[in-house]
Amino acid sequence: MSEEIGVGPHPEPWPAGEHLDRELLRDGDRRNVIDRYRYWNVEAIRADLDDRRHPFHVAIENWEHDRNIGTVVRTANAFAAAEVHIVGRRRWNRRGAMMTDVYQHVRHHASVEDLAAWASAEGLPIVGVDNLPGAEPLETAELPERCVLLFGQEGPGLSEAARVAAAQVLSISQFGSTRSINAGVAAGIAMHTWIRLWSTPLS
């Protein structure tokens, strides 16, 4: 029998604080959150994350309702990315996000050009990630501390517009027979590479 996730009702007397959700205190907290956030309401969790988000952004093209987007959002939340940007179709499959999208800032851009204009105004270089000819290996590249990591649609990869918008394109080294790896996996690898370069491990 699998272990039940989370915690049950909080013993009375309940702790006080505006960050706490009375329904969770009463009924228990079975959400997929770290122990620090047990019984916290969504707004309080988002506000606390906002105080310590990292300065990198993640963007993914969404021209065909890519099912990897939920995974990208969930991973961006795990690594405290500043924001996730959906480029193309506004609608995306949230199932893979496992409700993390309620804690993670998600912005929509109708086109790559719109994303590029926003990034330029914010002073953020766009770093494309795709196994393209001439791409620099991610393993030896110098990722900017402030940047937008841009990923293409599952299958075709970065669109031509995305390649043009990217200040640099990085590839993930592969050693097997497959031509490419899953876009959600690639995003996780790139985000963790940024973490290793720029973030201090939590104590």
Image (tube, helix red, strand yellow):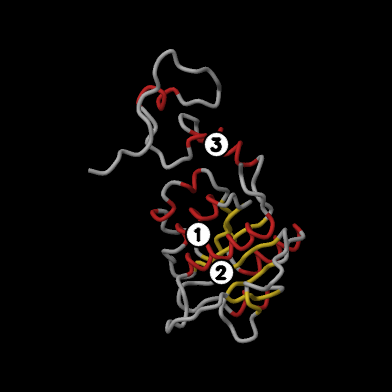
Which quarter of the picture shows residue 168? bottom right
Residue at 48% across, 66% down: 185
Residue at 39% across, 32% down: 29
Residue at 57% across, 52% down: 79
- The answer to which of marks 2 and 1 sits earlier in the sequence is 1
The amino acid type, in three-letter code, at marker 2 is: Phe
Q: Position of residue 84 (x, y in %)?
A: 57, 56
Q: Is residue 85 left or right of residue 143?
A: left
Q: Secondary structure at mark 2?
A: strand
Q: Is residue 166 left or right of residue 103?
A: right
Residue at 64% across, 47% down: 53
Residue 4 in the image: above or below residue 147: above
Residue occupied by mark 3: 45
Task: Determine the residue located farthest toward the bottom in the rendered image.
Answer: 133
Cα separation between marks 3 and 2: 27 Å
Q: Secondary structure at mark 3?
A: helix
Q: Which mark is residue 151?
A: 2
Tag 2 near tag 1, CB within 8 Å: yes
- The answer to which of marks 3 and 1 sits earlier in the sequence is 3
Which quarter of the picture shows residue 196? bottom right
Q: Secondary structure at mark 1?
A: helix
Residue 101 in the image: above or below residue 197: above
Task: From the viewer's side, name the closer residue of 150 and 15.
Answer: 15
Q: Position of residue 6 (x, y in %)?
A: 38, 36
Q: Which mark is residue 72?
A: 1
